Amino acid sequence: MKKIKKIKIKLNGKFSTINENLSLLIFLKKLKIPLKKVAIELNQEIIDKNKISRIKLKKNDKVEVVHFIGGG
Amino acid sequence: MIKDKLIVAKKVFNSRLIVGTGKYKNMLECAKAIKLSGAEIVTVAVRRVNISDKKKPLLMDYIDPKKITYLPNTAGCFNSDEALRTLRLAREIGGWKLVKLEVLGDKKNLFPDIIETLKSTEVLTKEGFKVMVYCNDDPLMAKRLENVGACAIMPLAAPIGSGLGIQNSTNIKIIRSQTKLPLIIDAGLGQASDAAIAMELGCDGVLANTAIAKAKKPFQMALAFKNGVIAGRQSFLAGRIEKSLYGSASSPTTGII
């Protein structure tokens, strides 16, 4: 059986090791991110949440997940 | 009573008080203070999701964006690029187009960088955002912001969080006289009377955060601000008497025994 390659990506500024070709949707779902309440950036580009199942994560990708918090 | 509503970017609000959601002890306190203040618009910040602590309470679980208008704010941004990125992300979260732009220029006094603010207002307006703009109390810059498409002018009363109250009421009056856009005093208020003064100057609304959140009794202060804004607005609409150097007796001078 072919061994699945691991890659490193950055999520909200912290390194994370994941399986190569993991989709952004599965990655965020595993982390239990409430997708309806967040916005997602991949390498500084805003991602349409309807399309995240089609996006495969690559080595050194930078993912940012933001939401609303209390502020002035 | 004549219907007197706050209208921003064609949206109608009963309350003229906007409150921030920062600096509260917890979400519960924040939600209760907002309710007591009667505010229908609250400012919110865009920040990274805490991946490691998923139990951290979410703002949306305490303040329902279907009932209260969220006003995404760019607090903490120090240039146009950061502010644009933040508001584009905010729009992506849930389609928010009404936003508050705040581009800071100095970490100590938190005054706005007005050049970056002007640049950002123009770009955001072209992208379809309705931009309420935090600015200093400079009538010329307020006019320029209006000219590039701002939907509301939000001059500071004093530095953010300072609690000093309105420092330059003359400039606020000048800005009031030159614009038909909603004029909302943003930042630097300390107590309910400051809000009343802003309204008496003819402003359309005020925004308060620290003054309520950091008051010894935030709930009581939220209520005080609500009443201060109402009192100030009614006083403005009622039309004050002329000021005089001399006294004018309130009782008739005839029939004195």
Image (cartoon, rainbow, N blue to C red):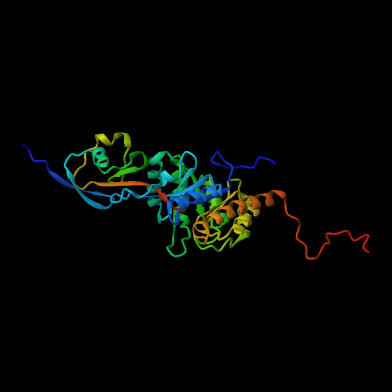
Q: Residue at x 75, y 60 (%)?
A: B243
Left or right side of B3 for B74: left
Query: Which quarter of the rendering shows the N terminus of chain A?
Result: top left
Q: Nearer the viewer, residue B119 or B97?
A: B97
Residue lying at the far left in this picture: please name it: A1
Q: Nearer the viewer, residue A70 or B187?
A: A70
Percent x, y for residue B40?
Answer: 53, 44
Is residue B39 among the parts visible in the rendering? yes
Is residue B171 among the parts visible in the rendering? no
Percent x, y for residue A31?
Answer: 26, 44
Percent x, y for residue A3?
Answer: 8, 41
Q: Nearer the viewer, residue B45 or A44?
A: B45
Left or right side of B177 for B91: left
Residue B92 sits above or below residue B114 on the image: above
Left or right side of B45 for B206: right
Q: Quadrant of residue B64?
A: top left
Q: How many marks?
A: 0
Percent x, y for residue B69?
Answer: 49, 42
Q: Residue at x 35, y 50 (%)?
A: B56
